[in-house]
Image (tube, helix red, strand yellow):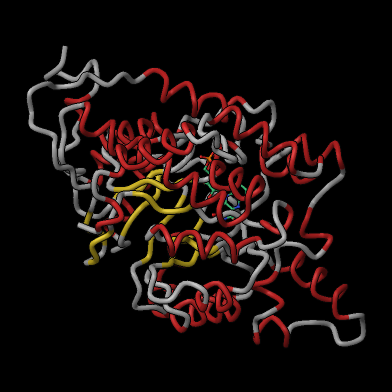
Amino acid sequence: MDPRHADLGRKRQGAVYLAGAGGHRPKVPVDQTALERAAQAAMSAEAWAYVAGGAGREATIEANRAAFARHRIVPRVLHDVETRDLSIELFGRRLPSPLLLCPIGVLKLVHEDADLAVARAAAAMAVPYIFSNQASVPMETCAAAMGDAPRWFQLYWSRSNELVASFVRRAEACGCSAIVLTLDTTMLGWRPRDLDLGSLPFLRGEGIAQYTSDPVFRTQLDPTVEPGVAAVRQFMATYSRPSLHWDDLKFLRQHTKLPVLLKGVLHPADARQAVELGVDGLIVSNHGGRQIDGEIAALDALPAVAEAVNGKIPVLFDSGIRGGADVFKALALGATAVCLGRPYVHGLAVAGQHGVEEVIANVLAELDLTLGLAGCTTVPSVSRSALHGSTECS
Ligand SMILES: Cc1cc2nc3c(=O)[nH]c(=O)nc-3n(C[C@H](O)[C@H](O)[C@H](O)COP(=O)(O)O)c2cc1C
């Protein structure tokens, strides 16, 4: 076990309370609502709309949280939980915890150190970071700041297969150990908060660093216009491909040996098809409620997807994780690991790299305590029977 992750919960409590006794309160709030409020205060109206906003009337954002609230943990007692191990095995590699960081685009809106601060925090906390295709900092720069720490690359499939191949090649070259293909954003969702501000960051040249640093993308630019304008125009023309189809996955398979995960799978039939086609993993996600208003809560989709996959490939989860108890519930409902999204962005807004580290430490501490208090000592032993309403519990 990574010593950084041993007895994490009590160590973290100890450190916070000891500092408190010395008159110091955490600069990065532990309470999620307070953290959100502090983050909002640190951001521009446009940045906050982009990060907090969802599709339509934001019923899916609400549903994500409501689904977590509906599930209740039923602890077991007298199980000797003195020693707890948060580690998991994923794609042949042991990870110190079941937590990864979601790909989140345009982080420059949130903090000037953007993806680089997150990369450093992820490496320091031994939590894999999934680089966004819409990052503000090129993947090579983030990778160089991470040493050997694990990172993955998230791909949006553009209209240019040459560009797709180039992104994947670069991801391999800078040490990414998996490719996450996001499938729920072949078009941007209808986002009233951004629409009412008339604000799309990409049009201002923000969040396109993976493109402007790409040798293939550069050859696609119109040389007759100013380079910044040409880049935005070419990005807008190429960035998404709604015609994407199951058959296209072959192209990706031919261009990488890395494990390929599909992000945004919610229907068990799609999960079964992915397994049949040799996909290496899934991420059950509704993109944090940003794509379809009234979409199923990701947590409600998880059990059926996990059942359809039947342990053949890992099933990761995101959308609505706000703390360690949420991680526990997702694990109990069939997730192999989970990805943290907006909360680390809030930490970034409040205190840069340090803020991201604090948020990760708090989530892991709460997970460690929840695990033990529920009567479990390892992540794989967390099962449906830990939740109210399962046949074993009722
Ligand atoms: C501001 C913002 C930007 C995002 N950018 C990306 C992205 O570039 N690629 C991607 O696959 N998902 C992106 N997502 C979705 C996240 O990866 C993840 O699915 C989502 O944040 C989970 O919901 P939660 O943060 O509410 O838990 C973004 C989400 C937010 C909030």
Q: Quadrant of residue 222?
A: bottom right
Residue 254, how many percent across, how many down?
39, 79
Image point 45% across, 52% down: which residue? 263
Residue 42, how many percent across, how many down?
74, 42
Above or below, 237 relative to 343: below
Above or below, 309 relative to 238: above
Q: Identify the image quadrant of the N terminus.
A: bottom left
The reply, left or right, for residue 366 in relation to residue 161 is left
Image point 86% across, 80% down: which residue? 227
Q: Quadrant of residue 96?
A: bottom left
Most extreme residue toward the front is 22
Image point 67% across, 80% down: which residue? 213
Viewer-closest of 44 and 257: 44
Q: Identify the image quadrant of the C terminus.
A: top left
Residue 273, how many percent across, how many down?
32, 52
Q: How many discs mark residues in the rendered view?
A: 0
Most extreme residue toward the top is 394
The reply, left or right, for residue 58 in relation to residue 386 is right
The reply, left or right, for residue 43 in relation to residue 59 is right
Above or below, 73 relative to 302: above
Residue 383, how many percent across, how many down?
18, 33
The reply, left or right, for residue 49 in relation to residue 333 is right
